[in-house]
Image: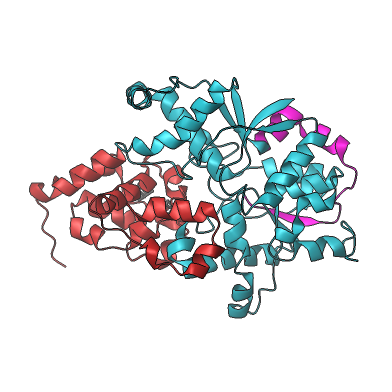
Chain colours: A cyan, B red
Amino acid sequence: MDLSYYPGCTLKTRALNFEDSAIAAMAVLGVNLIELPRWNCCGTVYSMTDDDLAHHIAPVRNLVRIAEQGSDRVVTLCSFCYNTLKRADLLMRNSPEKRNTINTFMDDEIDYDGQVEVVHLLEVLRDDVGWEAVARKVKTSLEGLKVAPYYGCTLTRPQEIAIDSVESPTVLQGLMQAVGTTVLDFPLATECCGSFEIVSDPDAVIERAYTILGMAQRKGADAIVVSCPLCAHNLGHKQAEIAGKYSDFTGMPIVYFTQLLALAVGVNPEVCRFDLNFGGVEALLRDRGLIPQRV
Amino acid sequence: MRLEISLGRLRNEFVAKITELSGQDINLCYQCGKCSAGCPMSFIMDLLPNQVIRSVQLGLAEDITSSRTPWLCASCLVCTVRCPKGIDIASVMEAVRQIALRRSEDFIDPAGLERDTVAELPPIALVCGFRKLTG
Ligand code: SF4
Ligand code: SF4
């Protein structure tokens, strides 16, 4: 199966470990993620004020590009891109007046009225591939690895675009069980990491991260599994500082779901770029014999 | 504290603008506090989300525009999905930010960020932060 794939800005810069592992793992599962030849930044966030149509142009232009390229479905890996593109698509489907204004403004493009279905990779894995098919492709079971699934905000809020239950999503659990890990009950799975506040108030984000990481540690997690590059950054990059401030915190590996999937279905660990992860993922996987010892 | 409640205050320009920008009927709020109970940023807020909504109801523009709360709101939408009255509180926060940003009252100065900070942050953080906190 071929699927149009929208990468977004961070997958191409700081989250190569997310992108490369996803493309390789999906190929093993028979899904070819084909990057759109032309795309622009989606703007990262969906504009929430009623009269602010200008900021919907960026995501809608992407949807136009996708339709133009003959696709009626696009998949994202980044949770933020999913949220922004999906909400922009909903707006264009459900608000005739705004759709008209936006289409008229972009009169050099084809009109967009919802020709494209925006999906997140986790939905493709659950609904198109299925957990049993994933399990059948597992070469190295990740048995013994205890993971805390972490969804953050943008996959399940608002309700209209949620890929799963808003309060109790299970899609990450389904995938992680299929690859053999033990999935922990994680009460902070949908709590916000502090998001963009990292730009203006890094100290507040450190507190958020400590709350979430500390809970994972108390639950006995070996790693937190994420699907958002902003969550990965906020939970990961200040761990040394957090450990310095809170002596009970000793570090927590942060890993993308695609990396564990890739490892399980036999993708070369080098492709997964565990060296780019925060929190000691390489050491954990080496310790469990899941990646080779360093030579 | 003595609080004057008058029609002029309840229906002032600020309340009208918030209503217009957010598309929300804030009078539906019955102050259950559920929005604040789940808010991940409440630990640093000077006004809790339910207090912001209450202040809009009472037309207390000053209290809201002088509060740091709308800028500390991370747009996580927990309040929005949990409000039993269906109020999109996150959009009210965005409306408050937009009113300031449209007056060129940015919350952060991108030029003032340390070079190391910028180098450390992924594009998603910078674009998102500038979209939310600058006009
Ligand atoms: S959850 Fe809704 S009804 Fe309850 S205090 Fe907040 S805004 Fe008001
Ligand atoms: S959207 Fe803002 S106000 Fe609402 S719960 Fe999240 S951080 Fe708090």
User: Residue, x 79% and y 35% (percent of image)?
Assistant: A27
Position of residue A202 relative to residue B122, above or below, is below
User: Residue, x 75% and y 42% (percent of image)?
Assistant: A175
Position of residue A190 relative to residue A94, above or below, is below
Position of residue B65 relative to residue A29, above or below, is below
Residue A145 among magenta residues? yes
**Occupied quadrant, residue A96:** top left
Instruction: Give x and y (percent) for residue A40.
Output: 51, 38
Q: Is residue B33 visible?
A: no
Instruction: Give x and y (percent) for residue B50.
Output: 34, 54
Position of residue A76 relative to residue A250, above or below, is above
| Residue stretch rendered in magenta on the structure | A122-150
Q: Quadrant of the C terminus of chain A?
A: bottom right
Q: Is residue A97 left or right of residue A69?
A: left
Instruction: Give x and y (percent) for residue A74.
Output: 60, 29
Between A192 and A82, the residue placed more toward the observer is A82
Q: Is residue A168 left or right of residue A61?
A: right
Q: Is residue A99 visible?
A: yes
Residue A63 among magenta residues? no
Q: Quadrant of the N terminus of chain A?
A: top right
User: Residue, x 66% and y 77% (percent of image)?
Assistant: A248
Tag count: 0
Between A53 and B62, the residue placed more toward the observer is A53
